[in-house]
Amino acid sequence: MNWQPFEDLNLRGFKPSWVFLDLDNTLWDFDGNAEEALHVLFQRHAIQEHTGATAEDFVRVYNRINHDYWARYERGEVSKEVLRSARFTDSFRELKYPESLIPDGIWKEYLDICPVLTRLMPGARDFVEAIAPHYKLAILTNGFEQTQQTKLACCGLGEYFEFMLSSEGLGHAKPSPLFFEAALSKAQTDAHDCLYVGDTFRTDVVGGVESGIRTAWYLREREVVQAEMEDSAEWKSWQPDDSSLYLGSFQHLPQLQQALLTGI
Ligand SMILES: [Mg+2]
């Protein structure tokens, strides 16, 4: 192993023209906003009254089922439509919510509530405002086009970005090099002039580095992830062709902000 996934971020003096950023759980607090939306649904549909489950039970069951459906969606086993609705109907059934009362359009209610919520990752607004005068910014996100556009517009950061590419809009998802090639083409630049930042190892770190783009890993819970990954064949078996493209990990956006603004 000649690359060190958990080493501290070091830009090594690199000053790109473009900074490409993942959206969910890198700038937009996906986990926090999703949980808030689930609490709204929990109240609205009287889940406690019908099942005895607490809001925490509902969130935990939904998160497990949602995670499983996303994995199946990414493997091409289920459609977008199935993913969107079955994660809710399966959760209601698991909690023994009365079958006849399971709301038909609950998937749509969630999609209406969640993207308009505006929690950001700690320091995200300051980070974007501080670096925007010095770098061209773009969002590269795996997700549904309209949903991601709504999130970006509602959280008030949209104006800082030259463009956003979504996996649904492109027809390719990270970590596919086709996704990153599309971003470079849209930016009319090449990989050497870009930094990519994301929070997910498989899609963001592997995807960025294998596309020839210098990549930084937003790794908030380093100890937890390190413990999980040391047992994972996935990262043990990944050997980047050019490990110098990986610039290390950081736990807080202000760290990256400082690194990008040093010497400017
Ligand atoms: Mg992410």
Image (cartoon, rainbow, N blue to C red):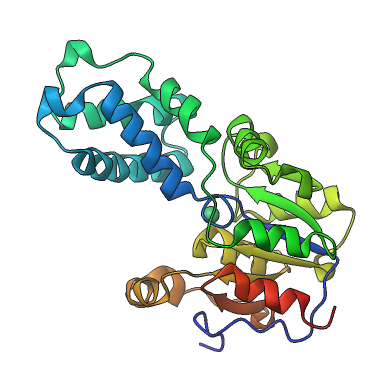
| Outermost residue, right side | 188
Residue at left offset 56%, top offset 57%? 26
Looking at the image, is 75 positioned above or below residue 136? above
Identify which residue is drawn at 77% across, 51% down: 183
Would you place residue 56 above or below residue 223 in this image? above
Residue 245: image quadrant is: bottom right
Q: Residue furthest top?
A: 100
Quarter of the rendering containing residue 27: bottom right
User: Closest to the observer: 150 or 14?
Assistant: 150
Measured from the top left, where is residue 248 in percent x and y? 59, 79
Horizontally, residue 220 falls left or right of residue 254, namely left
Along the horizontal axis of the image, is 225 left or right of 118? left
Q: Nearer the viewer, residue 21 or 232?
A: 21
Comparing 188 with 220, the one in front is: 220
Numbered circles on residues, count: 0
Furthest residue to the left?
Answer: 52
Q: Where does residue 78 sit, x and y in percent of width and height?
A: 42, 32
Q: Position of residue 2 (x, y in %)?
A: 56, 89
Q: Is residue 10 left or right of residue 56?
A: right
In the image, is residue 96 above or below residue 137? above
Residue drawn at x 27%, y 41% is 59
Quarter of the rendering containing residue 18: bottom right
Q: Residue at x 52, y 79 (%)?
A: 5
Name the one closer to the observer, 27 or 167. 27
Q: Could you tell me which quadrant the C terminus lies in?
A: bottom right
The percent position of residue 73, horizontal first and vertical second, equals 44, 39
